[in-house]
Amino acid sequence: GRFRGKRVVCLKALESGLLLVTGPYKINGVPLRRVNQAYVIGTSTKVDVSGVDVSSINDAYFARAAAKSADGEEGFFANDAAKPAVVSDQRKADQKKVDAAVLKAVEATPLLKNYLGSNFTLGKHDR
């Protein structure tokens, strides 16, 4: 997907089995997201996230608002213009709150900020 190869911090496992991760956004641009465990490669790098409060974030937090649809076939084809994605103020506030706590833990470890900012890649001779 869009954040392929990004290194992230896993915050918790959600009830649905997905992982709650963040970049933090300030370091590598990855917001609070749910990720399937099959797309994650765990490493031995540890970050203390005990000071991060993510108890209010669950699967319902990521549910999309139901869009109002026009009636009939004409209404379906009439709105061809793409609507821009709008991030709610609640999500922005939660992102800042979580990032502040994660950044404090990241900056306590030397070179971890650089590590999270780099992408994961495999070269020609990597096995």
Image (cartoon, rainbow, N blue to C red):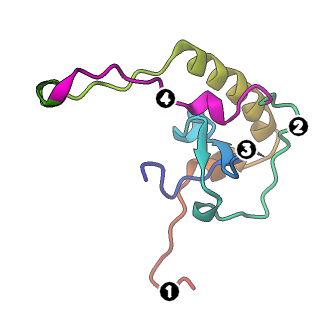
Query: Is residue 56 rendered magenta in the image?
Result: yes
Find disc 4 in the rendering and name its residue.
Answer: 64
Task: Judge whether 92 appears above or below 30 on screen.
Answer: above
Q: Earlier in the sequence, mark 2 or mark 1?
A: 2
Point 73% across, 44% down: residue: 14
The quarter of the picture where residue 76 lies is: top left
Question: In this orientation, which residue lies closer to the viewer: 62 or 8?
Answer: 62
The quarter of the picture where residue 55 lies is: top right
Residue 3 visible to the viewer = yes
Point 81% across, 37% down: residue: 105
Q: Amino acid at mark 2?
A: Ser
x and y percentages locating residue 123 in the rendered image = 47, 77
Point 71% across, 30% down: residue: 57
Q: How far, Cα to Cα, is label 2 from label 1?
A: 38 Å
Q: Amino acid at mark 1?
A: His
Screen quadrant of the C terminus: bottom right
Point 42% across, 49% down: residue: 2
Q: Is residue 4 left or right of residue 40?
A: left
Q: Amino acid at mark 4?
A: Arg
- Res. 16 mark: none
Q: Earlier in the sequence, mark 1 or mark 3?
A: 3
Find disc 1 in the rendering and name its residue.
Answer: 125
The quarter of the picture where residue 48 lies is: top right
Find disc 3 in the rendering and name its residue.
Answer: 14
Q: Nearer the observer, disc 2 or disc 4?
A: 4
